[in-house]
C-alpha cells in the first residue's frame, strides 16, 4: 500500500473513532449540561420564593396550615409548600416521581428545601419535568453526528490533498532515482525540489550512494580495461619470442613440442585477456550499434566458422528463421560473437550425434530466437549463476574453457537490450531464448 | 625491402627484427618517436611498423609525418590499445593495416605480403604443387584443367597461409589464430585444425595425391615447395 493511502486511511479511521465516541457521549453530556441548567434555574426559583416569603410572610402561600401546591396546565413544572416536622431537614436536588390527583405519575427533577418561619418548619419542593430534557438530546445527537461527519469528510479531502502535495517529492525521488534506473548506468543527478528536509536528506543520500556505486563500478571497469591492455604487450613479446625460437634450426623436436606447450598456455592467457578486454569495452559502451544484417545471413557466417565443429561431433543443425528478419541498430561483430558463443556451447555440451535447432518466433511485441540442443543440460540450481565470470559448472567435461563464454553473451545481450531466458533439463538439453525488442529486429 | 620498426618495447622490437631479417627484410629499429621521426625524414622505407603507444610521441602523428614524407611507404599500426577509434583514425590517416597486440609474427608477415601484392598489382599469383595449381589471386585450386570446387573458404585460407609460409612448420595454434582470429572465443583448443586438414586431404584425394601437404608429427603442418 502506498504511503499516501496509508496516511489518509489512518487519518480517516482515527477521526471516525473519535467522532463516534463523541456522539455516543452526547446524551450523557447533554443530560449533564441540561441538569446543571435546570438545577440553577430551580435554585433561582427557590431563592425568589424565599425572598417573597421573607418580604410578604409565609401567609402569601400558606393560610391556616393548608398546604400550597401549583403546577402548569401540562404539569411540566410544579411548586409545593407544606409544613413538616420541626426536626425534618432537607436540602437536595434529585430525580423523583410524583403522583397527581388525576392518577398520572411523572418524573421530575425536584429541589427539596426546608426552612423555618416563626418556629415552624416548611418543606418547599420545586419540580421540572425530565421528559423535556430527553427530547432535546436525540435531535442534538443527530445534528452533531451529521455535522461532524461532514467535517470529517472535508478534513479527509484536505488530508488527501495535502499529503499528496507534501509527498510529491518522495514520489519523484522514487520515480526518478530508484525505479527505472538502469544499473550501473545512472542518470545525471537532478535535485528534487522539496521544502521537506527529510526528503532533501533522502534525495542527497540516495544520490551519494548511487555516486559511490557508479564510481566503484567505473573504477572496476577501468581496472579491468587497463590491466588487460597492459597485459597485451608482455604477451605479445612472449608470443614473438616463442615463434622465433620455434624457427631456430638447431633445436630438437622435443624442445619444439615443449615450445608448443608454452604457446598453448600463452594462448590461454591471451584468450582470457582478450575476452576480459572485450567485456570491458562492451560495458564502457565503446561499440557502435549501427549495423543492419539479415538474421539468416549472420547465422550463416557463424555456421561457416563453426561447421567443422559440428562435423567433428556429427551434430545435426537446423535453422528455421524467416528470411525477412533483419537485425537493425546492432553491432554485427558483437552479435556474431553472441551467436558464436551460444552455438559453440551447444556443440561443446552436446553428445556425439546430437542436434541443435535454431528457431525464430515472432511474439506480441518482440522477436524470439531460441537455440536448443539435446546435450548434457545444466543443473537447475546452477542456472542463475551461469552468466557469472569464471564460473564453470560443467567441469566433468574434458573441455578446455575458462568460463567467459556466457559472460560475453550476457554483456553483448545487455548492451543491446536483448533478454536471455534459459530453460534446461539435466541430461536432456538446454534452450537459450534470445528475446529481441522490436527496435532490433524488423520483418520486411 | 626496407622496414622501419618503431616500438618502445625493446624485447618486442628485437623479435620483430630477428623475424623480418629471416624473411630477408632489411630492418631499422627505433625505440622512441623522436629518433623515428628523424629516420623517416632521412630514409626511404617500404614498410613502417608503428607502435601507437610511444612514450614521447603520438603514434598517429608519426603516421602523419611518414605519409607526408613518403606516401609510398606502407604503414602498419601495431597497438596494445585496440581501441576502435584508434583503428578508424589510423586507417583514415592512410595506414595500410592495423594489427592489435598480441599478434603472431606470421600474421604480420602475411599482412605485409598482402600489401606487397596489392601495391605491385600481382595478377598472376599461381603456385604449382604436385599436379595441383593453386591460384592465390582468384582463390581456386585446379587439377589438370578441372577445378576442385568443394574446397571451402576456410580450407582455402589454411592452404594459402601454409603456402605463404612455405617449408615452415606451422603449429595448430598459429593456424587457428589465423583463421579464427576475429572470433573472441571461450576456448583455446585448436584441434579443429586437424579436422580441416583431414577434409582438405579427402577432397583433394579425389583428384590426386596432395602429398605436399605434410603433417609434422607432434608439431603441426607444412607445405613443401622446392624453389
Image (cartoon, rainbow, N blue to C red):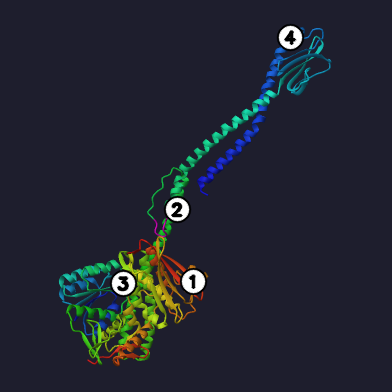
Q: Chain of mark 1?
A: A
Residue depicted at 77% across the width and 7% down the height? A59
Across and down, in percent, residue A289 comes to: 32, 64
Residue underneath mark 3: B80
Q: Residues within 10 Å of mark 2 (few under 14, many from 20)?
A: some
Could you tell me which residue is drawn at 60 percent across and 37 percent down? A18
Q: Which residue is mark 2?
A: A206
- Magenta residues, as a range? A178-186
- Where is residue B134? Give x, y as percent: 24, 86
| Callouts 2 and 3 in the same chain | no
Label 1 secondary element: strand
Which label belongs to residue A424?
1
**Mark nearer the N terminus (4 vs 2):** 4
- The answer as to whether the residues below labels 4 and 2 share one chain is yes
- Whole-percent x and y of residue A295? 34, 69
Q: Are marks 3 and 1 on the same chain?
A: no
Q: Report the side of B162 relative to A307 (left or right).
A: left
Residue A36: mark in rendering:
none
Amino acid at each position: 500500500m502506498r504511503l499516501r493511502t496509508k496516511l489518509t486511511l489512518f487519518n480517516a479511521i482515527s477521526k471516525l473513532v473519535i467522532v463516534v465516541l463523541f456522539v455516543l457521549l452526547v446524551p450523557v453530556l447533554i443530560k449533564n449540561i441540561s441538569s446543571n441548567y435546570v438545577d440553577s434555574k430551580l435554585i433561582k426559583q427557590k431563592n425568589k420564593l424565599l425572598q417573597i416569603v421573607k418580604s410578604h410572610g409565609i401567609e402569601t402561600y400558606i393560610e391556616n396550615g393548608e398546604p400550597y401546591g401549583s403546577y402548569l396546565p401540562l404539569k411540566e413544572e410544579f411548586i409545593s409548600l407544606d409544613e413538616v416536622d420541626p426536626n425534618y431537614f432537607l436540602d437536595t436536588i434529585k430525580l423523583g416521581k410524583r403522583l397527581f390527583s388525576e392518577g398520572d405519575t411523572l418524573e421530575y427533577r425536584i429541589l427539596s428545601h426546608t426552612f423555618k418561619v416563626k418556629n415552624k418548619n416548611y418543606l418547599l419542593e420545586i419540580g421540572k419535568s425530565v421528559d423535556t430534557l430527553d427530547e432535546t438530546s436525540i435531535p442534538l445527537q443527530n445534528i452533531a453526528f451529521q455535522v461532524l461527519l461532514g467535517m470529517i469528510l472535508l478534513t479527509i479531502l484536505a488530508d488527501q490533498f495535502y499529503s499528496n502535495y507534501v509527498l510529491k517529492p518522495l514520489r519523484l525521488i522514487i520515480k526518478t532515482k530508484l525505479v527505472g534506473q538502469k544499473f550501473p548506468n545512472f542518470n545525471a543527478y537532478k535535485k528534487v525540489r522539496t521544502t521537506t528536509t527529510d526528503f532533501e536528506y533522502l534525495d542527497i543520500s540516495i544520490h551519494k550512494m548511487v555516486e559511490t556505486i557508479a564510481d566503484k563500478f567505473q573504477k572496476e571497469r577501468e581496472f579491468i580495461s587497463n590491466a588487460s591492455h597492459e597485459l597485451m604487450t608482455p604477451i605479445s613479446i612472449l608470443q614473438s619470442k616463442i615463434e622465433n625460437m620455434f624457427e631456430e634450426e638447431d633445436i630438437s623436436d622435443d624442445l619444439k613440442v615443449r615450445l608448443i606447450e608454452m604457446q598453448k598456455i600463452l594462448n590461454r592467457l591471451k584468450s582470457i585477456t582478450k575476452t576480459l578486454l572485450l567485456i570491458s569495452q562492451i560495458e564502457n559502451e565503446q561499440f557502435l550499434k549501427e549495423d543492419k544484417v539479415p538474421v539468416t545471413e549472420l547465422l550463416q557466417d557463424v555456421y561457416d566458422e563453426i561447421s567443422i565443429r559440428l562435423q567433428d561431433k556429427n551434430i545435426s543443425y537446423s535453422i528455421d528463421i524467416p528470411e525477412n528478419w533483419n537485425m537493425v541498430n546492432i553491432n554485427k561483430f558483437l552479435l556474431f560473437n553472441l551467436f558464436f558463443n551460444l552455438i559453440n556451447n551447444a556443440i561443446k555440451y552436446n553428445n556425439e550425434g546430437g542436434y541443435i535447432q535454431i528457431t525464430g518466433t515472432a511474439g506480441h511485441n518482440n522477436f524470439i530466437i531460441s537455440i536448443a540442443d539435446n546435450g548434457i543440460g545444466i543443473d537447475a540450481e546452477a542456472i542463475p549463476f551461469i552468466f557469472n565470470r569464471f564460473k564453470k559448472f560443467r567441469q566433468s567435461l574434458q573441455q578446455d574453457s575458462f568460463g567467459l563464454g556466457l559472460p560475453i553473451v550476457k554483456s553483448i545481450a545487455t548492451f543491446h537490450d536483448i533478454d536471455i531466458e534459459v530453460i534446461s533439463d539435466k541430461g536432456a538439453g538446454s534452450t537459450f531464448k534470445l528475446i529481441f525488442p522490436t527496435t532490433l529486429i524488423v520483418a520486411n | 625491402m626496407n622496414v622501419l620498426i618503431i616500438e618502445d618495447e625493446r624485447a618486442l622490437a628485437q623479435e620483430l627484427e630477428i623475424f623480418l631479417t629471416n624473411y630477408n627484410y632489411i630492418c631499422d629499429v627505433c625505440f622512441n618517436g623522436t629518433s623515428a621521426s628523424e629516420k623517416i625524414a632521412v630514409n626511404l622505407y617500404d614498410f613502417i611498423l608503428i607502435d601507437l603507444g610511444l612514450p614521447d610521441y603520438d603514434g598517429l602523428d608519426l603516421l602523419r609525418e611518414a605519409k607526408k614524407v613518403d606516401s609510398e611507404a606502407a604503414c602498419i599500426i601495431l597497438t596494445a590499445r585496440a581501441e576502435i577509434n584508434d583503428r578508424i583514425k589510423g586507417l583514415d590517416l592512410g595506414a595500410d593495416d592495423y594489427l592489435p597486440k598480441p599478434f603472431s609474427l606470421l600474421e604480420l608477415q602475411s599482412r605485409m605480403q598482402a600489401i606487397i601484392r596489392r601495391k605491385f598489382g600481382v595478377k598472376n599469383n599461381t603456385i604449382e604443387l604436385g599436379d595441383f595449381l593453386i591460384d592465390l589471386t582468384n582463390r581456386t585450386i585446379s587439377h589438370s584443367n578441372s577445378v576442385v570446387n568443394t574446397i571451402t573458404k576456410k580450407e582455402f585460407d589454411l592452404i594459402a597461409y601454409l603456402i605463404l609460409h612455405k617449408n615452415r612448420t606451422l603449429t595448430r595454434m598459429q593456424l587457428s589464430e589465423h583463421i579464427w582470429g576475429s572470433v573472441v572465443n571461450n576456448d583455446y583448443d585448436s584441434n579443429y585444425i586437424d579436422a580441416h586438414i583431414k577434409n582438405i586431404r579427402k577432397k583433394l584425394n579425389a583428384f590426386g595425391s596432395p602429398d605436399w601437404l605434410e603433417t609434422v608429427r607432434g608439431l603441426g603442418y607444412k607445405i613443401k615447395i622446392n624453389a
